[in-house]
Image (cartoon, rainbow, N blue to C red):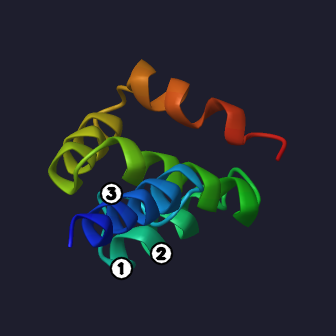
Amino acid sequence: MRRGWWCAGLALLAMWSCGGGPPNPYPAEIVENFVASCRTHADEKNCRCAIDRIERRWSLDEFKAFEARMAAGDVPKEMVDTVADCRGR
């Protein structure tokens, strides 16, 4: 019985470390709206990289707060830093 739990834990750790799904998956509509908006400034690959990193770092509520700040003209440094290395991928 203990071995089963250990193996399951190891499998989850491997999936997380190998880039499994984001811990904070957003609704598909939010993701697609982000990508569509982003594509006015970057290619789709970079935009998908960006939203993946954002989902991994912030909850949906936190992301919506960032969106509100950006709509007001404030570009949060932590958001820029999170997606910076997606450029040129």
Q: Image height check: is 79 above or below 34?
A: above
Q: Image height check: is 25 above or below 86?
A: below
| Residue 32 numbered tag | 2
Separation (CA) of disc 2 from disc 3: 18 Å
What residue would you read off at disc 1? Answer: 29
Question: Please, what is the three-letter code of the amino acid marked with disc 1?
Answer: Glu
Q: Residue at x 31, y 66 (%)?
A: 3
Question: Please, what is the three-letter code of the amino acid marked with disc 2?
Answer: Glu
Q: Secondary structure at mark 3?
A: loop
Q: Residue at x 42, y 58 (%)?
A: 10
Label 2 CA crowd tier, 10 Å (few <14, some 14–19, many 20+): some
| Residue 23 numbered tag | 3
Residue closest to the eye, 80 or 68: 80
Residue closest to the eye, 38 or 24: 24
Question: Please, what is the three-letter code of the amino acid marked with disc 3?
Answer: Pro
Image quadrant where one finds the N terminus: bottom left
Task: Tell me if label 1 and label 2 are in contact, CB under 8 Å.
Answer: yes
Q: Image height check: is 4 above or below 87?
A: below
